[in-house]
Image (cartoon, rainbow, N blue to C red):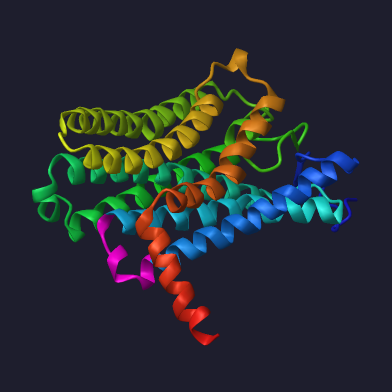
Amino acid sequence: MVDANDTTEINFILLGLFNHAPTHVFLFSMVLMIFLTSLMANALMILLIHEDPQLHTPMYFLLSQLSLMDMMLVSTIVPKMATNYLMGTKSISPAGCGAQIFLFLTLGGGECFLLAAMAYDRYVAICHPLRYPILMNQKLCLHMTAGSWLLGGVDGLIQAGATLSFPYCHSREINHFFCEAPSLVRLACADTTFFEFFMYVCCILMLLIPLSLILASYSLILAAVLCMKSTAAQKKASATCSSHLAVVGLFYGTLIFTYMRPKSYRSVAHDKVVSAFYTIFTPVLNPLIYSVRNKDVKGALRKWLEKHFLGHL
């Protein structure tokens, strides 16, 4: 007779990223600090964009959506990982596992298309500045944002449902710190060849198509910048685009490394480290990259501080 409280047979086991060695305790503390910094930095970015009328433009609206996605992404992964580590537990229910897969793929896929929309926005602003209000109107901006969320959600729903439909009749130990589809599929006691091929096709659609659009946009931007006669205009365009390219490089580089490498080249240890990069570190870097190198955001922050804090002194 099976004990009703014994969930080890139905729950998955997350082996995690850290053990309780002094070095790992320090690294775990750093991850918590990065998590809290990410939440505060992205929340502040959303607040500034909402509060400052000068930031009510398509570029900053898209940036606020990026911050929202980053906040949700890091909140999908770190709280469960931290709870398991602090409480000394490793289990996660199938429903919790499915929710992590769905949210991660929804937010990750949505961010891919959102970055493509941001690249198009910069292309129009730099290459067609006079037609910018027409080509990048509010309706198009909302459609691109909604499309990013929708495409990410469809990908997440399909992959989460398919992953959990496999029988897991042997080991349920996931050598990862969160439920990620490739790590879970390795444990299935069924033929997953077709699904792995399907995942690869999804990766092409969700990663390479937006990346191709981004590279095309920035190629045209680079050509336009090189033709500019004003050095000041060149510097302004380059500063804005370099911030966007830094975010794109960090996000796409790590995702492609994880999801599009041949199976024979995959290493569980490498996958965990790279996954930590795009689920924990990239969300805190995005608002820092955009704020440190952006005069408008720094100006909005200064005005907000003067209004809410310095004004009361």
On the image, the x and y values in percent for residue 87 come to: 85, 56
Q: Residue at x 24, y 37 (%)?
A: 234
Quadrant of the frame with the C terminus: bottom right
- Residue appearing at x 54%, y 21% in the figure: 193
Is residue 244 visible from the viewing direction of this image? Answer: yes
Taking the spot 81% from the left edge, 50% from the top edge, the residue there is 85
Q: Tell me the quarter of the picture where residue 223 sits.
A: top left
User: Measured from the top left, where is residue 171 in percent x and y?
Assistant: 78, 32
- In front here: 185 or 224? 224
From this view, report whether residue 41 is shown above or below residue 94: below
Q: Is residue 254 magenta?
A: no
- Find the magenta span and give its range: 49-58
Q: Is residue 40 above or below residue 259?
A: below
Q: Main secondary structure of the magenta part?
A: helix
Residue placed farthest to the front in the image?
231
- Location of residue 231 by image quarter: top left
Report whether 299 appears left or right of 192.
left
Image position, residue 70 (x, y; %): 50, 52
Q: Residue at x 64, y 59 (%)?
A: 36
